[in-house]
Amino acid sequence: MTRIRHNAIASLFLALACGADRAPAPLVVATTTSVEDSGLMDVLVPAFEGAEPAFRLQVIAVGSGEAFALGRRGDADLLITHAPDDEAEFVRRGFGEESTTIMSSHFVIVGPAADPARVRAAMSVEDALRRVAGAAAPFLTRGDSSGTHRQEMALWRQAGLSPWRDGAAWYRESGVGMAELLRVAGERAAYTLSDRGTFLVVGETTGLTILYDDASESLYNPYAATIVKDARQKEGARAFYEWLRGPGQAVIGTYGQERFGRPLFEPSIRPG
């Protein structure tokens, strides 16, 4: 199993091309940084490779937007993303062969424990964001077209605000993955939107805390697996896709239970 971040993708594909005549093509999975940073891939990959020893996974951790770009170029075989509208569009335009929701979590608003914007007192997520804007409190955005970034922008619009368009000085773009964003937000005592799983895994090292969390549809965070139509390793992509929909659901449903007393992700497919 190999993992790689966005800035080394070119090196990965060069290595794959050079070794193409010596070994079967690896199964390249482009997954969101939140799935990687939560640690879930650390259990999914060995479990799948143990069940299907004919395949070896190469994991690329990027935002959902970049994952779709890799899929469109045929540089990934299977995508794990959390951008439902984009997933549907990817399949509709013929880039994806099949897509299904495999798990979900929720987004949360995190920030400094002192909470200068009084987000803890918010009655809704829209109220929480208006409090941040009203206090001109520092807020860090992914700014990378990831699923988290797109959901964050949708939430600001629900609140009747668009700080990126208004040039608000308190609204800053990071352009980094989820775990790194949390670390930077902690250093700057800033607010941000995070998936709950990544925050539970890395949040205690940042000095941030969960300030707003509810079970509303607005904060629902579904993840889908999508087979790329022009996948180089189509057989492996299909095998991993079916495993995620089948035995992988039990792995997803227990991950985090021992450490946090609750799973970090909710499986989406119940045994029939």
Image (spheres, helix red, strand yellow):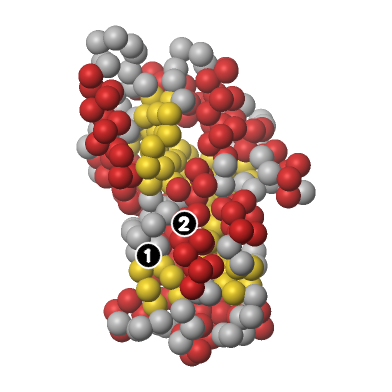
Q: Is residue 258 visible?
A: yes
Furthest-top residue in view? 22
Contact, mark 1 vs mark 2 (Cβ under 8 Å): yes
Q: Amino acid at mark 2?
A: Glu
Who's the residue at 61% across and 81% down the image? 115
Who's the residue at 49% across and 83% down the image? 137
Residue 69 falls left or right of residue 171: left
Who's the residue at 57% across and 85% down the image? 117
Q: Nearer the viewer, residue 1 or 144?
A: 1
Who's the residue at 61% across and 58% down the image? 205
Q: Nearer the viewer, residue 184 or 231?
A: 184
Sequence order check: which comes first, mark 1 or mark 2? 1
Label 1: how many Cα within 10 Å (few below 14, some 14–19, many 20+): some
Quadrant in the picture for residue 111: bottom right
**Quarter the C terminus occupies:** top right
Q: Marks 1 and 2, Cα distance to the nearest angstrom?
A: 9 Å
| Residue 45 against residue 184 in the figure, above or below | above
Percent from the top left, x then y, of residue 223?
A: 50, 47
SS type, badge 1: loop
Q: Nearer the viewer, residue 187 or 50?
A: 187
Q: Nearer the viewer, residue 32 or 79?
A: 32
SS type, badge 2: helix
Tag shown at residue 112: none
> What residue is pinned by disc 1?
174
Residue 168 falls left or right of residue 54: left
> What residue is pinned by disc 2?
180
| Residue 37 against residue 43 in the figure, above or below | below
Percent from the top left, x then y, of residue 254?
A: 70, 38
Furthest-bottom residue in view? 134
Percent from the top left, x then y, of residue 5?
A: 37, 42
Q: Amino acid at mark 1?
A: Ser
